[in-house]
Amino acid sequence: MQDWLLQVSNPETKFVPGQPLQVPSNNESNLQSATGMAPSHTPIPLSTPPTIPAPHPTAVFLSAEVVELIKSEAYTRMVRIIFDETFFPANEATLNTMAEKALDEAIAQSSNAADLKKWKMRSEGQHEISKLKGILTRIRNEFKDLALTSVINAYLLDLAIDKRGSARVALRIERIRSLLANDSFLHGFMMLIGSDGQPRPFGIPFGSNAIINMLEIILSEKQYHRFVFYDGSERWKNRLMNLISFISTTFKWALGRYSTGRLLAAEFVTAENTAFYQAVLRQMYQLSPLGMIYFDGLLIDLRDTFLMSAHPIYQAWNPSWIRERAVEVLFEGGDVDESSVGEVILDTLLKVPLDLRKTLASFLL
């Protein structure tokens, strides 16, 4: 199997003295003695400095139902943005931008957008942005915990309970060292049809059983397939690649925790793990032409298995079913007229969520 290795001034402020005191001239100092009168001065009336009136909060009239709908929509959009952009934002400002973007997108699609923009600037809206930022931590914790609980079975790291002393963990330590040495824990084999027409194993980048099984748990059992959505573009591939990169990082972290044979404590959000996540993403775009073909095929298989078929109404809008129905009506003398084909297609499209319709329509054209 081919190895795909990772390349992992304060300016000084000077005091400037004020203007020198004005010393009265001889004429001014002798004025009183010459005239017997003190000099007169025109009094300057004192006035209160102008004040800026305190702003009065603009009234915002929103029902609790509208606010809750926006919060729910913002949650969905925040998870999608994480899948779409990154599981390791560069800094707190980047994460804050992601959260604001999620809330802004949710507000923009509401008929109450004007009032919701005012609501966003108030304490409740700002608190919601903070909650949206916390979604990233929750997702990272959920996925890394899944990796930690499955890593022993996924990579056959059983303890040799029939041994004693250090021999009990020796095989585990050696296997983990081998898996991490050349990143072989990322890649796997699949049976494909060779040039001779016979099935044989091919090395697939990022196709390890551990990663694929984790994708099934996350996308199907945990229902995260809802967030790797279709919008008529190839962005769904980028979202899957982001997820695979993050899963790869969680397994590297989990293997490291068992690297001495027994479970060790270890932080997850570290510079090392961030760098590994980014290195995996870079490698996906730098595969050899053959590796890219295999990896692209893997992504398509994952889409068809965990994304398309996972949708609850998949059977109702499967394009192949629609084509079969069209053939039946048009070419096999069905008992309905040809106009019903258009009705079938339209009725099917209307059953599909709005963000999936464009992709489905492109399959049919």
Image: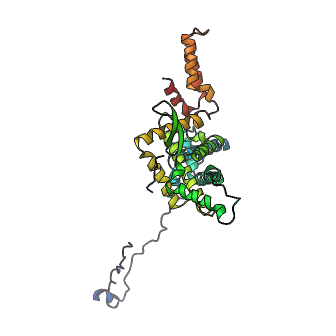
**Compared to 23, does 308 lie above or below?**
above
Q: Residue at x 59, y 24 (%)?
A: 348
Q: Is residue 5 left or right of residue 132?
A: left
Residue 92: % across, % down: 52, 58
Farthest residue toward the left? 26
The residue closer to the viewer here, 279 or 96, is 279
The residue closer to the viewer here, 250 or 154, is 154
**Compared to 281, does 314 lie above or below?**
above
The residue closer to the viewer here, 249 or 155, is 155
Residue 52: % across, % down: 50, 60
**Compared to 299, does 21 lie above or below?**
below
| Residue 22 figure quarter | bottom left
Q: Residue at x 63, y 44 (%)?
A: 217
Residue 152: % across, % down: 64, 53
Farthest residue toward the bottom? 33
* Count of number-bearing discs: 0
The residue closer to the viewer here, 339 or 60, is 339
Residue 113: % across, % down: 55, 41
Q: Is residue 182 left or right of residue 26?
A: right
Q: Is residue 102 left or right of residue 33?
A: right
Asked whether residue 237 appears in the rendered view, the answer is yes
Asked whether residue 62 appears in the rendered view, the answer is no
Q: Identify the coloring.
A: rainbow
